[in-house]
Every structure is written in structure tokens, then in C-alpha cells.
Image (cartoon, helix red, strand yellow):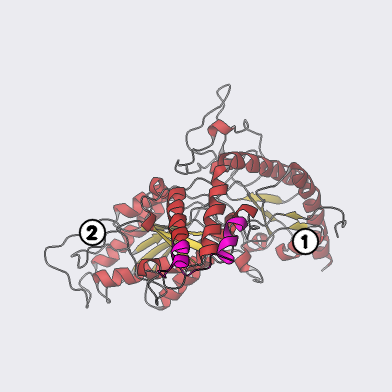
Amino acid sequence: MTNANEPYVYADSAATTPLSPRALEAMMPYLTTKFGNPSGIHRMARETASALDGARNDMARLLGAANASDIYFTSGGSESDNWILRGAVQRYRDLYGAATPVRIVTSAIEHHAILHCCEALEREGVQVTHLPVDRQGLVHAEDLEEALTANERAAACGIEAPGFAAAPGHTTASAGGDAPGLATPPATALVSIMLANNEVGTIEPIRELAAVAHAHGAPFHTDAVQAVGHIPVDVQELGIDALSLSAHKFHGPRGVGALYLRKGFSIPPLITGGAQERGERAGTENVAGIVGMVTALEEACETLRSDILRISSLRDELVRHLLGEVEDMALTGTPIKCTSADGTKTPCTPACDASALPDRNAPVSRATDDGATGEPSGASDGEALDCSPSIGRLPSIASFTCDDVDGELLVVLLDRAGVAAATGSACSTGSTEPSHVLTAMGIPAQRARGALRLSLASDITAEDVTLLSKRIPACIRKARLISSIR
């Protein structure tokens, strides 16, 4: 066990983050004196309603949304994901008839909030296609194109399904349109692909994928729970119709999140009752939580560029040390400086500087096969500058596989040694099955069971990295020793 005088290092920020003091301060009035229900009409109600309106305006601005009315507040990412999936299915049936086959396309590495909801929808007759990913966890546009084309071929065989009543004179809708009774409904009700993976940190080429979906008339949703507050996210630049987020991933309070719905793309409510959220999501709004969430996101965006550079630099230092110190250990996800496509160590490229970081409102670039992204800039002596730490994967996440190691045993040993880490998604704790993300990436089950995810805190320091570099190899050696004794 770690010495009581030595600091405990928190490296599980992908699971949750501590509440920002600034967010807590902003919340306090709405937990104490400003407690009015924003649906009322008296003075105290108007006070909280004004705070709610202000938060909605600020959230729209921070996400690059065109209208404050595009923002709906929820209880978190899981509710937002379920709402968009179930809402898109019901919207499709409302538009094109209850008997018209409904099809959804998603990826094999989505969060369980998406995958489990899709499983439930399949039991209700919805057809779900799970796109494959490559060894880095990337979804490819050609696979989406193929899936959407396959849906169109299938739809062409049964477009006159019983119950579908086409209104005369109507033609195919544009992506996300709400015109009822179209003569030729799009074959796919929704495409949902996450912006950044919660286990390996890979950032998906969302703008490219959304363009493919729209070319086939399908609306596009992205689960951005892990991305918002950590990389630049602009819904208009990404060209998406819907986005989910959760406050506690960027130092906001737990139990609050949001769903962005582009104007013109409306879905039925998931929770019915009162007329809150313009009649789209019943339940008295969590004003304190909403104010805290928006304050935390504002704070994160203020230092986003510098945080990306600082955290990814420390993350890279940690990766280099661990791969050099521990045998049979490989990085998973998009490569970073000094790693190759298979996660092993390679010669370094020039360090990324702040001038190469994306602008606050710039779209996220897609990582190439060698880990570089977008247009290289700032290179010297004709050498391309590798800025993948800030673009190709989330800055804070370093994920590995360790041969001959049980991941859960390793996490227990790390905890005793003073490190909070994870073996995969926090939502999968207790499962004996290997990570579905790593399995989808083609990593053998035996190796996937030795997964280790380090997600660094926003205030990570060089001293913390030194401690991690010392404690993690020691715990891996101990885990291997215990496993060999067994």
C-alpha cells in the first residue's frame, strides 16, 4: 500500500470529475434562497426562470448552436441518448406509418447507454446496424455509406408496407426534415455515432460521417459525453442534428445533462407530464444543476487550448515511460507521438506547439492511419508535425492492454498503491467479459482482459506523472506475479 504521506493520484476522470468550486458557488443561491419553481409566475419563480433562460443561452453559445431553443436540459447523458434514440424511432413512425420498418445505424463501440437502448429497440422491431471499427477504434465513412445503401435496398423491397399512407404530391424529405406523409421515406431513421470513445479516447470523424448520413436523408446524432469540455465542439461545424452531453464529465454536478436538437428536427418527448422544456421534457427543472453545468463548461472552455496542450503533453510523457518500462504492454486507440499503429514505441516526431491547436470553433480533424491529423503545421526541417495528442484522441486518455494481467486485479492493486484507474468503462464494472470496445477493435479477449484506462485529471501535474510512472509498472509486475502463482 502507498505511504499515508504520499498523495493519492486520481486517474479516472473519464468516469467522473470533481465539482468545480466556481460551479458550486454559482449553484448555491439556487439550492438555498432562490428556490422558486421556474414554471410559476410570481417573483421567485420569475427569478429562477430568468436563470434558466440565461443558462440555455449560454449553453447554446458554448456549443455553437444557432438558437437557444435548440437546447433541452436532461438528467444526464443516458437520458439524452435514450431520448434521441426512442424519439427518432417514434418520429419516423409518426411520419411514415407505424408499420414502416424502422432502421438505425450506430457503431460497435458506443457507450452502453446507446447499445442497451438499441437492444431494447430491436426487441420492439427496430432494425439496428452496428458499424465496425478499425484497430484504432475509428469508424470509416465507406462502412457507413455501405450500411445506409443496404438499408435503402432493403426499404425498396417493402416500401409499400401495410400501414404506410403516402400523401399525394410529396417527395423525399431532406435530412432531418419534419414534413409528414412523404412519398419516399428515408431508409434510415437515425445514425448515432459517438464523438469520442470513453475507453480508448479515439475521436471519430463526425463531420465526414454526418455528411454521409445526410446524403442519404438520415439525421445524425453524436454522443459527445466524453468530448464536451475536453476538445472543441461546435454543433454547426460538425453538421449534426443532435448531441448528448453530461455535466459531471467536465467538473459540473452529477444528475444533469443536455440534448441539442437542431431547429427543424423535432422528436416526441421521452418523459411526459408537465409542460417544462417547452413541452418536450416533463419534470421541474434542476435549476441549480443546470446553472452549475453551464458554469463548469464556461470555465472549461476558457482554458481549453492551453489545457489540451498541457494535459496531452503530460499524457505522452506517461505513455512513453510506461511503454519503455513494461514489457508486453501496448497503447490502444489512436496513436500518439512515439507510438505506431499497433501501440508500440517508435521514434519521436517534433513536439506540438500551441499554434497548431484547433481554434475554439474549429471542427475536429480525423486522425490518419499513422496518427497524424488534418493539415500538419509548425514543422521544421521538412518534418511533419504530429499533433495527434490534441486532435486524434482525447487529451487526457491513455489506454493500454497488458499481457498476462487481469485488469480488475490490476485496478485493485493500483488503488492500494495510491492510484485511481479503470479497466474500461465505469459503467461496466463487475463484468467478467472483455471490453466490447477492445473486442470490436480486434483485440483478442485474453489480451483485452488486461485493459488499463488512465484518464488524467484536468489539474494533473508533472509530480503526478512521476508517481504514476513509478507505481503503475510496480503494480503490473505484482499482478503478473499473482497471476502466475494462481
The quarter holding residue 378 reads top right
| Vertical comparison of 154 with 137: above or below | below
Magenta highlight range = 24-49
Q: Who comes first in sequence, dot 2 or dot 1?
A: 2
The quarter holding residue 106 reads bottom left
Give the camera-side residue of 302 and 419.
302
- For the residues labelled 2 and 1, the Cα–Cα distance comes to 54 Å
Cβ–Cβ below 8 Å for labels 2 and 1? no
Give the camera-side residue of 232 and 435.
232
Disc 1 marks which residue?
Answer: 415
Q: Residue furthest left?
A: 169
The x and y percentages for residue 164 are 21, 74
Q: Which mark is residue 393?
A: none
Q: Is residue 244 left or right of residue 460?
A: left
Give the camera-side residue of 97 and 343.
97
Disc 2 marks which residue?
Answer: 173
- SS assignment at label 1: helix
The x and y percentages for residue 172 are 21, 59
Q: Is residue 243 left or right of residue 135?
A: left
- SS assignment at label 2: loop
Amino acid of disc 1: Asp
User: Would residue 51 be counted in the magenta stretch?
Assistant: no
Q: Residue furthest front?
A: 43
